[in-house]
Image: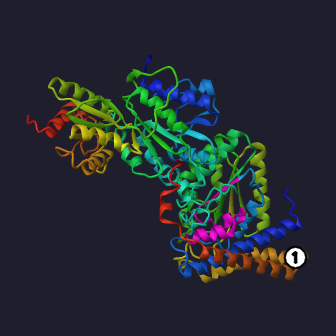
Amino acid sequence: MAKEVNKNQLKKMLYDMMLIRHFEEKAGQMYGLKKIGGFCHLYNGEEAVAVGSVAAIDLKKDYLLTGYRDHGHALACGMDPKSIMAELFGKITGCSRGKGGSMHLFDADKHFLGGNGIVGAQIPIATGVAFAQKYRNDGGVTLCFFGDGAIHQGAFHESLNMAKIWNLPIVYICENNQWGMGTNFRKVSSVDDFSLLGTAYGIPGKQINGMDVIEVYQEVSKAVEQARESGLPSLIEARTYRYKGHSMSDPAKYRTKEEVEEYRKQDPILILKDKLLKEGILTEKEYEKFDSQIQAIVDEAVEFAEKSEEPALHTMYEDILVE
Amino acid sequence: MPIITYREALNQALDEEMARDESVFLIGEEVGEYNGAYKVSKGLLDKYGPRRVIDTPITELGFTGIGVGAAMAGLRPVVEWMTHNFALLALDQVVNNAAKMRYMSGGQFKLPIVFRGPNGPAEYLAAQHSQALQTYWTHVPGLKVVAPATPYDAKGLLKSAIRDDNPVVVLEGELMYAWKGEVPEEEYLVPIGKADVKREGTDVTIVTYSKPLKVVQEAADVLAQEGIQVEIVDLRTLRPIDEETVYQSVRKTNRAVVVDESWPVVSVGSHMAWLISKNCFDVLDAQVELVASEDIPMPYNHTLELAAQPSVDKVIAAVKKVLYLGE
C-alpha cells in the first residue's frame, strides 16, 4: 500500500526541491566567481531523491549519510543554507568551520552524518550507524546514499552482506544518475538493474523513478517501515539524472545534448509543480512566492558567507583530537 | 603480584572495560566462537553474548568501517584485526575516515574506537605475514598509536585506549602474547603518551618499543658485564610521542641508539633518530645510531628471517659504535 501524501507534504517537497535547485545554481555561480574552490559536485536534477527520502524518515531518531554530492541531502535534512554556503566559501561560520568544504558537510544535531569524499566509504560507515541503532534498540533507521559509481566498490558488497546477517535497520539508496564521472553505468556494470545486486545477499531490491518525488517518498517509506518494524535492510535504485557535469570542472562532453534535454523534460520540480497546479493544490502565485522566498534565502546565504571571517590560522590545529 | 601472559593481560583489559561500559563491544574475525585467532578474546562471548562479541565475515574494510560508523553514533567499538597485515585492506576506513571525521566536521564528532591486533614479524610466516606496519598508522594525524611491550603496559594501555575518545591503534605481537610479567590485581591505567624508563643507566640511551624491548634488555645485560650501563627508554606510545622522557635520558648519557623492528626508511625509528639529533645536538657525543630490520620483504627461511631483524649482536654493535669502542 502506497503511503498517502497530504497537500502540505506535497507543497513542502516542492519547496525543498526548489531550495536545492536554487542553492545549487547559486553555488555554481559562486564557483565561477572563484568564491568556491576545489571539487564541487552539484545535485541539479536529482532533487527528488533526497527530498522524497528525507520526507520518509524522522531525523530525531533516524540518520542519513551520503557521498560527495551532498549539498542536496544536507539541505533536505534541514541544515541552514547559510552554514552550508559559508562552508563552501571556506569560512569559519561554515558547518565544518571551513575545514570540510563541499564534500564534507555535517550536522550532528540534525543527524546528517556527512558527505564523504571517498567513493563508497560511507556505505560501511552507515552500516555501522545502523549497527549502533540496533545495538541500542532505539527504533532508528539509517538511510545510506551512494551513486552508480560506488555500487561496484567492495565496501558496498561487504556491507550488504553484514547488514543482512545481522538484520540491520538500513535502507541503501543508489542514486543512479547514469554517469560515474564520464563513464556510463552500463559500460561498467554486469547488470543494468542495480536493484538486483541485493539478491545475492538476500536483500530485497527495487528500482524506482528517482525523478518522481512522490514515488521516492512512497517507496522509501515502505523500506523504512520494513527496517523499523522487522529490522530488515533493503536496496533501492533510484534512476535519476544530473544536469551538470560530474563536478564544476567537467563540461560533460561524453553525453549528448539530446539526452540531457530528454531528462530535463522529466524534471522533478516541473513534474510536481504541474501536478499540484492541475490538482488545485498550488496556485501559480504560491509558486512564485516560494520562488522569491527561496531566492532571498539563497541570497542571504551568499551574503552571510561573504561577510563571514576567514578562519584564524590557529584553528587549523583544532578539532584533530578530543583533548 | 600475579604473573600472567601478555595475552591474558589484554583479555583482562577487554573484560574489565566491557563490564564497566555497556557501549564497549568487540568486533572482528574469529573473536567469538573461536575465542580469538590468538585467544585474546577467550571467554568473552560466553560472558557478554553475541550482541557484544561479534564474529564478522572476512571483510576487513567492511567491519572496520562498521566500527567507524558505530563510533560516530556513540558506541565504543574495539575492532580486532587478525593481524595488522590484513588491516591494509581497511587502511581507507582508518586513514580517511576514523582519523579525519572529527577534523572534517569542524569538531562535531568524536571517534572513540580502538583498532587492535598483532603487528610485526613472528616466525616462518614470510613476507605477507611478517610486517611491522606501525609507520603507516603513526604517520597519520588524528590517530593515537600505542605499542606496549610488557603485560603490565598491555593491560594498562588497552584500558586507556578503550576509554579514550579518539581512535587508538594498538600494536600487539604474535610472539609477545605468551610473554609473562607482573600485573597487579587492582585496577590501573597506563596513560597514553608517556614513555617509560625500563632500565636506568649512564653510558648510552637505547630508545625502543614493542617486541625489540626484549632484545635490547638482553643486550643491556651483556653490555653491563663489560661495564657499559645502558638506559632503556620504552616509548610505549608512538603517537603522540613522549619526546621529553627521551631527551632527559639523552641529556644524561649523551649517546643514543634507536631500535625499531620496522623497515629503516621513513620509519618511527628514523623519525626518533632525527628528533634526537635535532633536539639533543648540543649534548650528543656521537651520531645517533638506528638498528632496524633489513630493508627487504621478510624471507621464509628461519636463518634469513632472524638475520633480517634487530638482534642482540646488532644492538651491542650499535652501542659500541656510539661509544667509539672498536671491535
Q: Quick check: A41 above or below B104? A: below
Q: For residue A304: magenta?
A: no
Q: Quick check: A260 above or below A102? A: below
On screen, residue A118 versus residue B293, left or right, reads right
Q: Farthest left residue? A: B326
Dot 1: within a 10 Å radius of its alpha carbon, few (fewer than 14), some, or many (20 or more) residues?
A: some
Q: In this view of the protein, which residue sits in the foreground, B252 or B299?
A: B252
Task: Determine if residue A144 is in view.
Answer: no
Residue B100, position in %: x, y? Answer: 51, 54
Q: In this view of the protein, which residue sits in the foreground, A41 or A184?
A: A41
Q: Secondary structure at mark 1?
A: loop
On screen, residue A320 versus residue A262, left or right, reads left
On screen, residue B170 versus residue B276, left or right, reads right
Question: How many numbered discs sit on the rendered protein?
Answer: 1
Q: In this view of the protein, which residue sits in the foreground, B254 or A255?
A: B254
Q: Amino acid at mark 1?
A: Leu
Q: For residue A80: magenta?
A: yes
Residue denoted by label 1:
A282
Give the magenta range: A63-90
Q: Quick check: B130 above or below A88? A: above
Q: Quick check: A224 above or below A88? A: above
Q: Residue B203 occupies which quadrant of the picture? A: top left
Residue B301, position in %: x, y? Answer: 25, 34
Identify the subunit bearing mark 1. Answer: A
Q: Residue A286 occupies which quadrant of the picture? A: bottom right
Q: Farthest right residue? A: A280
Q: Residue at x 50, y 27 (%)?
A: B188
Q: Residue at x 55, y 82 (%)?
A: A33
